[in-house]
Amino acid sequence: MVGAPFFCGEAMRKELFKKIKTDLAKMTLTELSARIGIQIPTLCRIVNGKSRGDIESWEKIAGYYGGEAVRETVSEMKGNS
């Protein structure tokens, strides 16, 4: 479905969260939020567990990581790891 909203399942969310944590070891929250394109408080709440984030935020996070986490998660779900 072209233009359909992206849905971030729990497995994918965990994989993306790992990537966020890795990047935060290399740069500040402010730098990462600017690169991803979401507001600093939103990313801060996601990282600190205060919020799960909304679909729009996770779409931007997945877009920033170039869909790599999406492909890895789908492969894991299919058993093609």
Image: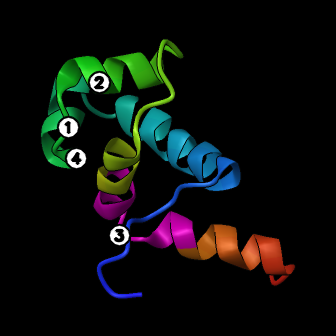
**Amino acid type shown at disc 4:** Ile
Is tag 4's residue or tag 3's residue first in the polypeptide sequence? 4
Pointer 3: what residue? 66
Residue span colored magenta: 61-70
Task: Say whether marks 4 and 1 touch (CB < 8 Å).
Answer: yes
The numbered mark, 2 or 3, whose residue comes first in the sequence reads: 2
In this rendering, the label closer to the viewer, 4 or 1 = 1
* Label 3: few (<14), some (14–19) or many (≥20) C-alpha neighbours in 10 Å: few
Q: Is residue 63 covered in magenta?
A: yes
Residue at 35% across, 69% down? 66
Q: Magenta: predominant secondary structure element?
A: helix
Is residue 4 depicted above or below 29 in this figure?
A: below
> Which residue corresponds to mark 2?
42
Badge 2 density bin: few <14, some 14–19, many ≥20, Cα 10 Å:
some
Residue 38 is labelled as: 1
At which x and y percent is residue 81? 80, 77
Cα distance in 3D space between marks 2 and 3: 20 Å
Q: Is residue 71 above or below residue 73?
A: below
Q: Position of residue 59 (x, y in %)?
A: 35, 55
Which residue type does callout 2 highlight? Thr
